[in-house]
Image (cartoon, helix red, strand yellow):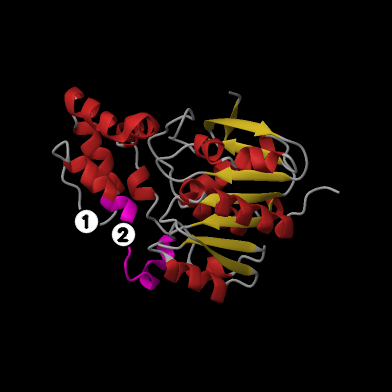
Amino acid sequence: MPEVEANGTRLFYQQTGTGPDVVLLHAVTSNQAIWLFSGLTDALAADYRVTTFDLRGHGQSERPPTGYTSADMAADFAALHAALGLRPAALVGHSFGGVTAVHAAALFPDRVRGVILSDSFFPALRPVEPNFGKMALWAEVREKFALVGVTLGETVDFNGLFRECAALDAERMLALEGIYGTFGRGWVRHLPRLAETTCGTDVMEVAGLTADVIAGVKQPVAALYDEFSPFLATCRWLEANLPACTAEIIPGAKHLAMLENAPGFLAAARRHLARIHPPAA
């Protein structure tokens, strides 16, 4: 897998296809493989040059001890964009990847043609979310960790998750990997690495991406939110406050629409990309 030095951090990336540029940004604790598993990379490569990369601290990219806010990640994107010689790109971001994409659109408007975000929570918009942190996905994580004697809080706490995972002995880690199975084993193994960083705190920082800055994004934004998302108030806020935002609900999904309803997510992503960043004729 090729790598590039971007913003002082070694990032691993992949590129496929030809045409206008699209960059895919994964969520915290995930990696670029999510786009391959979802089928999105292959689906878009017929019409676009698709770039995926592991965010700092994730996957095979370098793991610095600090620098995990959306501002830091947006700067990483801008440096990668320059290093690879990309043209103005449409950004597709899941969860925190969507936050990073919107921050990049605000900070580097000449490099971002538009944004498609998937079920993103913005720290600056926490006051509009009555059920912040009470995600169905988090409840599932709590249940599985409880099976190996780990008690996690009722609301999302990345720092606690990272610390508890790092403290597991080899026997309980092996048991947890067995609970998550082949697909989730890599995710579990990655969590202790993030305990050595400020990632858990940084991703909850506003980091300059205030409500006013979000509302000031001029590029077209497609806000794709899952039917059972805890962030539907954010979806409504984005649609009401961004000058060029279109919202759409992905049926049957809770936070991982690209896996929980891959056909619906892929169809929505392609449809909005055709509007935001049309394929070459």
Find residue 279 and report its horizontal and vertical position in percent. 78, 49
Residue at 23% x, 42% y: name it. 144
Is the residue 170 above or below the residue 180 in the image?
above
**Residue 54 makes an appearance in the image:** no
Q: Identify the magenta region.
A: 122-139
Find residue 114 and report its horizontal and vertical position in percent. 66, 57
* Element on which disc 1 rests: loop
Q: Are marks 2 and 1 in contact (CB under 8 Å)?
A: yes
Q: Bin the neighbour count of mark 1 within 10 Å (Cα to Cα): few under 14, some 14-19, many 20 and up.
A: few
Find residue 198 and report its horizontal and vertical position in percent. 34, 42
Residue 163: assigned label: none
The number of numbered badges drawn on the structure is 2
Find residue 62 and report its horizontal and vertical position in percent. 47, 29
Residue 133: assigned label: 2
Is the residue 69 above or below the residue 177 in the image?
below
Amino acid marked by disc 1: Glu
Residue at 21% x, 38% y: name it. 164
- Horizontally, residue 38 falls left or right of residue 105, namely left
- Is 125 contained in the magenta span? yes
The residues bearing labels 2 and 1 have C-alpha atoms spaced at a distance of 8 Å
* Element on which disc 2 rests: loop
Residue at 45% x, 68% y: name it. 234
- For label 1, the residue is 154
Q: Which of disc 1 and disc 2 is earlier in sequence? A: 2
Residue at 73% x, 40% y: name it. 46
- Is 209 contained in the magenta span? no
- Horizontally, residue 270 falls left or right of residue 36, namely right
Amino acid marked by disc 2: Gly
Q: Nearer the viewer, residue 61 or 79?
A: 61
